[in-house]
Image (spheres, rainbow, N blue to C red):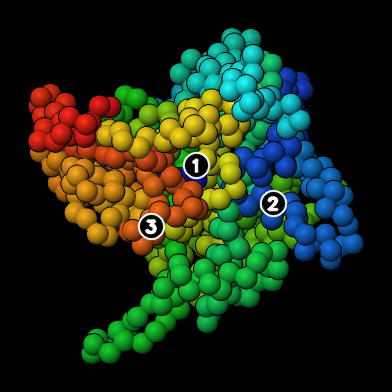
Amino acid sequence: MAVLRRRKCRVRSGALVITLAALAIAPPRPAHASTEPKCRGLKITEFLAYLQTEAGIEFDISPKIAEEEGMSMEQLIGRAQGLWEGATQFEYARALRDENPTVEEGAGGGGGTDGGEDDDDVGPVTYPYIVCSNDDDEDGVAQWDAAVGSAPAQRKPSGFERRQVIKDAIVSATTATGSTFDGGSAAMKDVFNARGTFCVIASLPGSVAQAIEFDTCVVQPMFLATKLGAGTVSLAVAIVNAYANGTKYELDDADDVSALIEEHAAPREVDSNGDGDTTAEDKAFPGLTVSLCPGFLSSDDVFSSVMKKQEKVDKIMTRWLLSKTAEGGESTSHIRSNTFWTGGNADNTTTRRGKFWNEVLDRVSETDVCANTFKKRLSWTIEPGIGENAFTNLHVTYNNSGASSTDNDCVLAMIAGISINPDICFFELNLEKRPQSDGLHRPNADWMVQSYVYQARPFFDVGLDGTGVVAAVSDTGLDVNNCYFWDKSNEVGKSHRKIISYNVFNGDDSDYQGGHGSHVCGLLAGKKASDGVTVDDDGQGDGIAPGAKIAFVDTTVGKDGYNYPSDTELLNAGREGVDDADKARI
């Protein structure tokens, strides 16, 4: 998932103790959905098309496995679908069990509370769901008639329209169930919008999720396999296997990741004697990002001080992530009973990854075996996400200098423990994000703007691509050296291939890493030229008007705060000191 970058504040970590039980929830009582969900769930093949996670590997979907087991891909997918449906039912049962826990039980893993008397979280426990409006019919997708030059008589609803339908359905489901949950305030994070399909993530009580109903509705509970970013486990295991003190795991379900290890796990140089001479140790473990579900910070928190946010996060982390201890027995029993592969699959059918999770939990099953690892080797920072369409992220750093095999095993077990918590929606290694070339991502923008008919670009067809147009943009900054704007031969100005002016006013002359301004300008008018001279044909980040130029106004210093120019200065950007034909008109 893309990480929304905002101001960071530090979470106290010096006196925090983690046990695996802190990352899990109470063992489930036998529980079954009291009613069948009104909406169907996602098929595993649909999910794999919409989001990039570990789900394909978790459920053994790969040509390599099909060949090894003498199965066709159709047979393999059929088996995976059966397991997927079992995991879906298991997660619904967890949500219903925890929706209204007794006073004695407390909200063991839902809603981020532990039932403490000073807890300010109210209402039923919620779990994360992917809720979609889906009428994507590959055989019936409306296509632009190039010969006639017109769209079909009836277009599909837009993502905005579908979002409102989902919102209204949540409110209706809340009313129908009599839940005390505030359906009207349910936060929704947009995660997919293309070809007749629009999906959000929303944290809902299980009964409300089951009661959602509208034409073309799809509701899918999220669980371990849907929360792990693509490559997270494969790369983490490969790195641990490479450590001198690492326990060797057999995980043959992934491609060779040696190149990724070299790229993302830098060698650690250590001066053990304090004499300035360093020696190479095991590579540093990549940072990890835990994305908390939508609505974690309410709109009221926008006006709170950083300290208030800090106190809230410290309390929640302390209760459900850091401070609990195992109540007897093995420290992983709670994780096992709340993970489908280890506690919910009645016929014991599993996958290669399912066996892996069993092995990991076996290795750290002794009570409090990981407490020292989590207390001394993990540090946390928080990246607040304000608003319903933003994730709040916890960034976790693992100091593996001198780590033992148990330390490494505990970090792998932590992935399973964190992922089953219902307040958490995604968990991934901090790897460099690369543009995708599958036709389902950036290329959507231009056809959706031009026709809202899949892959139909009538403006481009007649040569309208923004050439000759200048658009003024005011934002955080613009990376003029990015390949989508870079001009090797010309300075910013009339002759520059993309940027005719860069007005600083009260900002600075750059953008921060992952900055909003560069993203917006790229979406609007970016055109890739890897060498700064000749435009490329493979620009997956090309904008919706790739021929246009930009007059930019930088209103931000670094990442902190906006310094707006006067209305006159802002509106005259790109219009002063240039010929009439070259003036910004957008």
- The residue furthest right is 70
Q: What residue is disc 2 on? A: 56
Q: Quick check: can you spot residue 129?
A: no
Q: Residues within 10 Å of mark 1 (few under 14, many from 20)?
A: some
Closest to the observer: 567 or 108?
A: 567
Quarter of the view holding residue 137: top right
Please tell me whether mark 1 sits on a helix, a strand or a loop.
Answer: loop
What residue appears at the point 39 percent right and 41 percent down from the top-left corner? 546
Q: What residue is disc 3 on? A: 534
Please tell me whether mark 3 sits on a helix, a strand or a loop.
Answer: loop
Of the image marks 3 and 1, the number of the one nearer the N terminus: 1
Could you give the CA–CA distance between mark 2 and mark 3, rounded to whole angstroms?
Answer: 38 Å
Closest to the observer: 315 or 173?
A: 173
Please tell me whether mark 2 sits on a helix, a strand or a loop.
Answer: helix
Of the image marks 1 and 2, the number of the one nearer the N terminus: 2
Disc 3 or disc 1, which is closer to the eye? 3
502 is higher (above) or lower (below) than 156: below
Q: Is residue 72 left or right of residue 105?
A: right
Of the image marks 2 and 3, the number of the one nearer the N terminus: 2
What residue appears at the point 68 percent right and 67 percent down from the top-left corner? 251
